[in-house]
Image: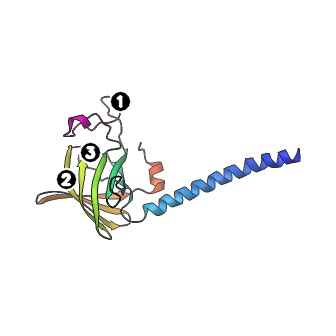
Amino acid sequence: MQKTLKTTLLTLFALPLLATSLYAQESSTYAQESSTGVQGVWQTEKKEDENRTAHVQISNCEDNPQQLCGKIIALEEPIDPNTGKPKLDKKNPDETLRARPIMGVLMLKGFNKEDENTYTGGTIYSPRTGKTYDSKLELVNGDTLEVTGYILFFWKTQTWTRVKASDSKTKNYS
């Protein structure tokens, strides 16, 4: 009887403590990873004519781990108000890709490290326009990333902000 009580008490107190410890360790690891270099989760800049942003996860490319890629992992407004379904990549120049959801789209591809804070040689895809541009990523500081898209001699730079682990849980993204 005493052995069973001891086992029950151990289970009741040890498991929640272990779970809390693992969650804290995971959050701490996320915070450490998100505060170093270009890799991590970034919130895109809001457009003047729109009030929407996305979260982009920048990490090593699956097909070439020496390069960086970025995937859309969250949208502020993921549902198309006209259909009630996830927003689709409707403006993609490849008609076969127009039925895919924007969530999960590889937005950044093929970036090579130029120096400690700069990655070049990649491209950025805009689901809003369906166009792909040559691009450069430059880490301004630990929480600010300048993303520049180029066409010939013209360019446009957006400022992206690092998403902290605590921010990703409080924002209304899915």
Q: Amino acid at mark 1?
A: Gly
x, y (%) of residue 24?
A: 58, 57
Figure quadrant of the N terminus: top right
Which of the marked residues, 1 or 2, is nearer the chain's N terminus? 1
Q: Is 148 on the left-hand or right-hand side of 87?
A: left
Q: Secondary structure at mark 1?
A: loop
Q: Residue at image x 28%, y 33%?
A: 99
Residue 45 colored in magenta in the image: no
Q: Residue at image x 24%, y 52%?
A: 124
Q: Quadrant of residue 79?
A: top left
Q: Which residue is mark 1?
A: 84
> Which label was assigned to residue 122?
none
Q: Which residue is mark 3?
A: 50
Q: Quadrant of residue 89?
A: top left
Q: Is residue 87 above or below residue 34?
A: above
> How was the colour assigned to the protein in this rendering?
rainbow
x, y (%) of residue 66?
A: 33, 61
Q: Which residue is mark 2?
A: 133
Question: Is there a contact, CB below 8 Å, between mark 3 and mark 2?
Answer: no
The part of the chain drawn in magenta is: 81-104
Q: Is 27 on the left-hand or right-hand side of 7?
A: left
Q: Nearer the viewer, mark 3 or mark 1?
A: 1
Q: Secondary structure at mark 2?
A: strand
Q: Residue at image x 22%, y 58%?
A: 135
x, y (%) of residue 64?
A: 32, 56
Which residue ends up furthest to the front in the rendered image?
Answer: 63
Which of the marked residues, 3 or 1, is nearer the chain's N terminus? 3
Q: Amino acid at mark 3?
A: Glu
Figure quadrant of the C terminus: top left
